[in-house]
Image (spheres, grey):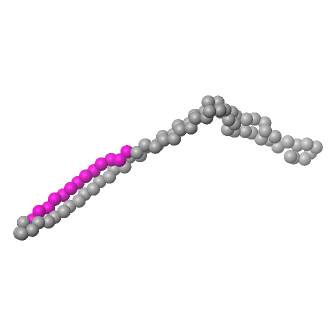
Amino acid sequence: MVTAIKIANNASLTRQTSEVQAVGVNVEGGGGGHGVEAGCTVQREREVYSIAGESFMAEEDFVYAFQVRKCHFGGRGV
């Protein structure tokens, strides 16, 4: 038998997560020709930000929890 219930009134839920990633690149190159040498080094670092979110808003009230108990009739549990 249900002995208690909890009802959500005007319920809303918002969840947001964020993440930061650091990305680094280091490239060396060389070349040249005809007795001339050439080379370079490229370094690049950047941070990537991302934000994700979810939201929920109930238009109507709803039952979100209930409590039940075992009932005994004539010595037998039902």
Q: In this view, does 29 lie above or below 23?
A: below
Q: Report the side of 63 relative to 23 (left or right).
A: right
Q: Where is residue 20 in the image (x, y as percent from the top left)?
A: 38, 46
Which residue is pictured at 51% across the width and 41% down the height? Answer: 54
Quarter of the figure with residue 75: top right
- Seen in the picture, residue 27 relative to 59 is either above or below; the reply is below
The residue at the far bottom in this view is 34
Identify whether 23 is placed above or below 71. below
Q: Looking at the image, which residue is at 67% across and 38% down?
A: 64
Magenta stretch, main secondary structure, is strand
Q: Where is residue 63 in the image (x, y as percent from the top left)?
A: 69, 36
Q: Is residue 46 magenta?
A: yes
| Residue 66 rendering spot, x and y as whole percentages | 72, 39
- State the residue in front, 20 or 56: 56
What is the magenta range? 37-49
Q: Does 76 lie within the magenta span?
A: no
Location of residue 30 in the rendering, given as x and y in whole percent from the top left corner: 16, 64
